[in-house]
């Protein structure tokens, strides 16, 4: 039993639920029995003993695995690969007994490689594909012919057609496995990137909640602290004849004053940032987003009449704008400009421009995809010491904005990046990278704006 357990038990770092593969194998065994039965009813001479032994090998493997493994067992990459290689060998053996590539069910030989591509890593998929191709060659070179019941009539397709079927099957194994692997990898990358997006949003919401809680604590604790300070002052006055007790009362009053000072600082920081109010001006929102990421040698310019409009402060929008402004600051030479406009009272347009080198065509084609980070390399290294971009920042920012109904576009203000002009003067258009964000006005602006004519606003 220990030997069987070492074969069937899952290894560390589990990946695949064993019950999924077991279910697939039971279906495969039922299909194989059905195909053999149909072949026998159609009058073909099938080596029953050999075929039954091949099917029983699959059945016994499943039964032993169900006994040895717990109900929710997971297989490691090596374990799952071993199972799929066994399936490929069992299917090749069964096809070898029943005509090889003359058997139309040879199409099922693609299945193990496709399953490996869907659930395993690229290395395991490569191993499964190579083994499947090797078994295909062996199946082409050796297979028992399909004979009718009289034993004389052989069901065999022409040799050229048979070679074409073998080649098509080999190409199908490679093509389908590669395609499924690419789709699965893209889905996994997207899932992890969306998880990072949710984490970023949760972080912003937690920071907003902490700020609100600190302000509430300062408000609620103000009155009791004032009462304690007054009582300590009275005790200090009454205990003048007892210096030791008077000193303790003075110490209590000093610590109470210190607590009141800390709460006052929290309230002042909240009022200065305007960050935790539900409605603030668009200018204040942009300044709050750019504050932590603006170096001393960079300047932020906010232009346009729409910058004074009241907007709803949301953690997702704040995080997204901070990311775009940080990228613009990192790759600008001296300044970043944000142009805000309300188009027809229906669309709020934000245009974030910098005076840096702009996007390369390669970077522009992939912006917004997860794990696509190219700007640091093309700029000759990371603009921030110790910074290593994973390519998730722009994806997270774009996803958060699009969830709120916005559209995000990337472009270069200067079509010909090689013809770089001198540094633009104040008021002249910047000619670096451009991020344009388009919001439906009713999704971002405070509802008080729509109490009047939006166009007038």
Image: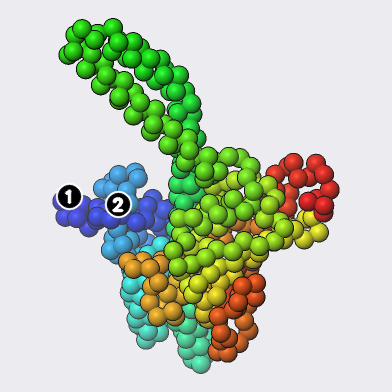
Q: Tell me the crowding category of disc 1: few under 14, some 14 to 19, or many 20 or more residues within 10 angstroms, Cα based.
A: few
Check disc 2 and report its element: helix, strand or loop: helix
Picture colour scheme: rainbow
- Find residue 220 and report its horizontal and vertical position in percent: 47, 23
Q: Tell me the crowding category of disc 2: few under 14, some 14 to 19, or many 20 or more residues within 10 angstroms, Cα based.
A: some
- Find residue 407 and report its horizontal and vertical position in percent: 66, 62
Q: Quadrant of residue 111?
A: bottom left
| Residue under numbered circle 1 | 1
- Find residue 276 and report its horizontal and vertical position in percent: 54, 41
| Residue under numbered circle 2 | 65
Nearer the observer, 87 or 285: 285
Nearer the observer, 370 or 417: 417
Residue drawn at (37%, 84%) of the image: 137
Q: Is residue 35 left or right of residue 127?
A: right
Check disc 1 and report its element: helix, strand or loop: loop
Please tell me which of labels 1 and 2 falls first in the chain.
1
Q: Is residue 340 left or right of residue 176?
A: right
């Amino acid at each position: 039993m220990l030997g069987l357990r070492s074969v069937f038990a899952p290894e560390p770092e589990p990946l695949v639920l064993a019950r999924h593969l077991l279910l697939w194998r039971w279906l495969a065994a039922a299909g194989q029995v059905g195909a053999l039965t149909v072949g026998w009813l159609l009058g073909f001479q099938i080596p029953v003993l050999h075929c039954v032994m091949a099917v029983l090998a699959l059945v016994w493997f499943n039964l032993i695995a169900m006994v040895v493994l717990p109900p929710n067992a997971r297989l490691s990459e090596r374990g799952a690969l071993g199972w799929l290689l066994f399936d490929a060998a069992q299917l090749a053996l069964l096809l070898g007994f029943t005509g090889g590539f003359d058997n139309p069910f040879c199409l099922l030989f693609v299945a193990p490689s496709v399953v490996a591509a869907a659930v395993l890593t690229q290395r395991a998929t490569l191993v499964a594909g190579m083994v499947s191709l090797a078994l295909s060659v062996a199946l082409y070179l050796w297979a028992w012919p399909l004979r009718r019941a009289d034993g004389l009539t052989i069901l065999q397709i022409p040799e050229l057609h048979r070679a074409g079927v073998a080649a098509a099957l080999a190409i199908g194994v490679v093509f389908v496995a590669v395609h499924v692997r690419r789709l699965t990898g893209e889905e996994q990358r997207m899932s992890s990137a969306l998880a990072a997006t949710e984490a970023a949003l949760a972080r912003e919401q937690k920071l907003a909640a902490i700020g609100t809680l600190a302000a509430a604590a300062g408000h609620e604790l103000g009155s009791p602290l004032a009462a304690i300070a007054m009582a300590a002052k009275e005790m200090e006055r009454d205990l003048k004849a007892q210096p030791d007790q008077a000193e303790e009362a003075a110490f209590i009053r000093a610590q109470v004053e210190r607590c009141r000072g800390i709460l006052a600082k929290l309230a002042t920081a909240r009022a200065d940032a305007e960050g935790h109010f539900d409605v603030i001006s668009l200018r204040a929102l942009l300044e709050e987003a750019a504050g932590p990421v603006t170096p001393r040698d960079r300047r932020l310019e906010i232009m346009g009449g729409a910058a004074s409009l009241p907007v709803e402060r949301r953690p997702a929008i704040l995080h997204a704008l901070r990311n775009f402004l940080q990228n613009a600051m990192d790759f600008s030479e001296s300044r970043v400009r944000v142009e805000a406009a309300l188009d027809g009272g229906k669309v709020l347009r934000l245009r974030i421009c910098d005076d840096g080198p702009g996007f390369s065509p390669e970077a522009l084609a992939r912006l917004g995809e997860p794990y696509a980070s190219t700007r640091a390399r093309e700029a000759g290294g990371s603009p921030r010491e110790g910074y290593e971009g994973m390519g998730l920042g722009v994806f997270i920012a774009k996803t958060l904005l699009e969830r709120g109904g916005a559209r995000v576009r990337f472009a270069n203000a200067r079509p010909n990046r090689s013809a770089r002009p001198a540094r633009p003067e104040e008021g002249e258009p910047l000619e670096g990278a451009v991020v344009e964000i388009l919001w439906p006005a009713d999704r971002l602006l405070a509802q008080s704006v729509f109490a009047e004519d939006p166009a007038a606003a």
